[in-house]
Image (tube, rainbow, N blue to C red):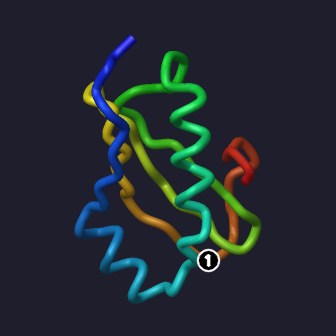
Amino acid sequence: MNNNPLKIRPKEHFFVQGLKRAFELSAIPAIYEFVSKNLDSIRRNEPNEWCIGTSTIVYSVDDNNTIHLITGWVGSRNKEAKNG
């Protein structure tokens, strides 16, 4: 188990796409909670999708317990995305 504190860091692309696409940010607390509860089993350094129905956010978690917000869009596209 990694004892580093959990952090969230958005990528520049996340901000740019958020401005262009106007997707909701309300999924971020749910992503944080999910990752914190599943830290030992979460896929590391791979993109994961979190869908709340109206918006989807793509994120990854690195080996230092940092959640990287990668991109997002309005709506959903992936049936395997974790639903909030």
Question: With 41 as the anchor, is 10 left or right in this view?
Answer: left
Q: Is residue 46 above or below residue 42?
A: below
Pick the front one: 58 or 36: 36
Q: Residue at x 38, y 56 (%)?
A: 69
Quadrant the N terminus occupies = top left
| Label 1: which secondary element | strand
How many residues crowd mark 1 within 10 Å: few (<14), some (14–19), many (20+)? some
Residue 13 location, quadrant: bottom left
Q: Amino acid at mark 1?
A: Val
Question: With 62 as the anchor, is 78 left or right in this view?
Answer: right
Q: Residue at x 76, y 67 (%)?
A: 53
Q: Residue at x 64, y 71 (%)?
A: 55
Among all residues in the image, which is located at the extreme top?
1
**Residue 67 coordinates in the image, percent (x, y):** 37, 45
**Residue 42 coordinates in the image, percent (x, y):** 51, 25
Q: How many marks?
A: 1
Q: Residue at x 44, y 49 (%)?
A: 59
**Residue 17 coordinates in the image, percent (x, y):** 39, 78
Pick the front one: 80 or 59: 59
Q: Which residue is mark 1?
A: 74
Q: Is residue 30 above or below residue 23?
A: above
**Residue 35 coordinates in the image, percent (x, y):** 53, 36
Q: Is residue 50 above or below residue 74?
A: above
Question: With 51 as the anchor, is 72 left or right in this view?
Answer: left
